[in-house]
Image: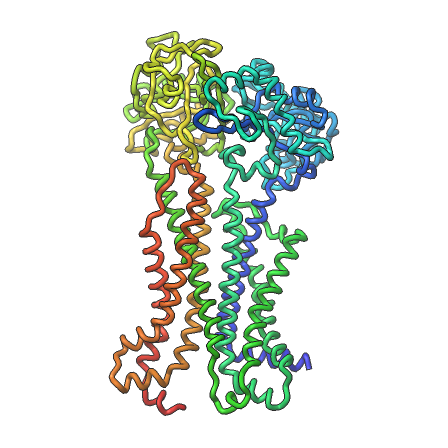
Amino acid sequence: MLKNYLKIALRNLWKNKTYLFINLIGMSVAFGVSSLLFLTTYDMLTFDMFHEKKGDIYRVYDKINNAEETKYGNTMPLPMRTALKTDYPQVKAATRIVTSPGQVLKDDKLINRGMAFTDEDYLKMFGYQLLQGDPKKALSELSNVVLREDVAKSIFGEQPALGKTITLIYDNLPHAFVVSGILEKGPENTSIANEMLVRMENLGEYNNNKDRWDASQNSLYIQLAEGTNPDTFEKGLKAFTAKYYKGSIEQLKKEGAKIDERGEVMSTRIMKLSDTHFDTKVGGRGRAINKFFPYVLLIVGIVILLIAAINFVNLSIAKSFGRAKEVGMRKALGALKTQIVGQFWGEAFIICVFAFGLGIAIAYLLNTQYNAIFKTSITLKTMTEPILLVAMLSCFAFITLIAGGYPAWAVTRFNTIEVLKGKIKLSSRSGGIRNSLIVFQFAMAVLLIACTMIVWTQIKFLRDKPLGFSTSEVYSIPIGNEVSGKRLLQHFRNRLAGQPRIYSMTGCDVNLGRGLDGSFSKSMLGFEQNGRTIQTNMRTADYDYVKTLGLKLIDGRDFSQAYPTDTVNSVVINETMAKQLGVKNPLGVILNTENKEKVIGVVKDFHFESLHREIEPVTFFMNGFGLNYLFVKIAPDHTEETIALLKKTYHELAPKSEFQGSFLDENAENQYKSESRMAQMFFSAATLAILLSCMGLFAIAIMVISQRTKEVGIRKVLGASVGSITLLLSIDFLKMVAIAIVIASPLAWWAMDAWLADFAYRTPIYWWIFVVTGLIAVGIAFATVSIQAIGAALSNPVKSLKTE
């Protein structure tokens, strides 16, 4: 019996090739695309989850309730690690991490690699396996370096690396290290750096800051002993904060700082390791993302699957009318309802199996291109994870049950006598379900189109908003570690003096935006000034900084070689810093810092960070951390020749380093890669949703219009025009699309308003976006339905009136 049913199913499928082709294409594309989206969601939601002790590892941060606003800090002072381990026995292990670009000297060439200055506890806490070396001794000596396996291979090839000496260049100086361990690479979805590990004491500023509580520069992670209640432990840190930040707390209270729910104006807090990737306030704007994003991808994947399943249902029902007499005959001959359901569900199951297999093949073929376009690192091997495997199989079973089960059930409800007489039509209930499914399809499509337009509007806003400094004419060059920044800048000035296409140049310790080296850093300075607590970004700059970047000088002057003391005790500040000082005229004010710097200039506020953040106070020093980037303002014409000259000049002094120059407008745009990726994903999903929805709508149009053939014939005989008949046949579908627009528009507004809340500077959600979205949906739907409606209107009415 089963073999007979299988033969009948295959014959019916082969006989209806168009129906088979549409369902296979729709379902397989939906399975393939949804698989990629689900894998991306899984990759994001499992960020930092592979660490075995993740449940006991926490990141330390601070919360400061100023009178005006609440601020969070994710960098801690160097002595905090020792203090926590000493004062709290619950802290089983603790490690500091400072990431920095580094270079490995190999065969007279420099290989760019990331460095992490850290502590011995690093290898105890995190989930990376040490493939070679002793975990207890790998970071025991200051001269030890632990290399990730791919880094070791890039340096030594297939030769053994353990025990070998390598030269690392950082802080513009060469340093010899002995390879004491080889670390596994591990998954990509982690925020814990592991390319090259060296001891924290090797950090250039370590000796100056090792006992300072007013200088914060390192991330700090702690591992609590098993059984420790994190909430109780965090509340117990109140005494710790009061002990080590007594002066700061008193000063904050004098300034009217707010007391929070724990009775603190300043508090030391902890956050789960797995939560840091989704906290854009504390986790930072490095790799932190809004948790809204992965859940949106998950919903989009489910929506695409549901739209394809709805198409399957509608196409199956439409096709069932062509087999009504077959069903009626089988019922008349005594076939049971379960047998008929089994027959139709079996055909649907066969299609779903083939579609699922093709979907996996599509996902495999698109995987590389998908990763390249959307900057992900997913692999189909992840689908073997038990939780994903169960989820995918459950999803397949559910789709198969819905797509095959409902049409099969609907077919068995045909009245046998009516069917054999040739009279069969859908019940009003079936029509209601069908219409509801169409409304759902287009509501989801409209939602995706509206979200896509709002995301692109925000991205355009970010790109077009003036940043307060020159972007398209300023070229940023990472200096690297082969030569000191001061020396390289002076070399550029000497070699390029008098070049007509080079207007000016300067240097800074931090890039503007995110350049090709991908580096991002932030240094804060805190001090008390006239009874006020001052918190400012600290940046190192050289002569002509204001001129080169095109900043607007409100008062005073820029750093100048005519004033030798500028290199020692002069600073330039922005407007926000000037307001924080609380004086009418900040020029000449002596800051209560270690070197008692004097304010010599005030520049108009500019966006030195991304537009996710409001403009913060910034102070430029000449005697800070050294120069890591050159900024060169060049003429807008013949840029290729000018860049070639800059590259040649760079390699004259740093022949072993890679030249990674880029314009500042490119750097600014790189800050919004995640937003651009989100827009691309929305656009792709919206396009696919529209195509799938149109396929389903077209199938329903065929079914409904075929039932109104006689009505069309009568109207034509009575003189109705082709246009009026087309509109008549299309109007019911357009009403459903209109309902979908009404449902989807407020949902899109709510979702996008929540997403835009992550930006300090954002575009309004314009009303015309929903109007344009509605017009697009109506236009596409009308075009889809009108193809069949026009065909029916142009048909010969004699033929339709002859058939009854």
Q: Return the x and y of residue 439 as percentages of the image width and height.
A: 43, 65
Residue 440 in the image: above or below residue 630: below
Residue 646 in the image: above or below residue 710: above
Q: Is residue 191 left or right of residue 93?
A: left
The residue located at (59%, 90%) in the rendering is 332
Is 722 in front, or is 138?
Answer: 722
Q: Is residue 407 left or right of residue 664?
A: right
Q: Return the x and y of residue 90 as percentages of the image width and height.
A: 71, 27
- Image quadrant assignment for residue 137: top right
Q: Return the x and y of residue 612 as percentages of the image width and height.
A: 43, 36
Is 786 in front, or is 727?
Answer: 727
Q: Return the x and y of residue 457 as percentages of the image width and height.
A: 36, 46
The residue located at (65%, 19%) in the rendering is 83
The residue located at (64%, 22%) in the rendering is 81
Quadrant containing the N terminus is: bottom right
Tally of numbered tags: 0
Residue 284 in the image: above or below residue 310: above
Residue 433 in the image: above or below residue 336: above
- Image quadrant assignment for residue 13: bottom right
Residue 651 appears in view: no
Colour mapping: rainbow
- Image quadrant assignment for residue 606: top left
Quadrant containing the C terminus is: bottom left
Is 381 in front, or is 792?
Answer: 792
Residue 436 appears in view: yes
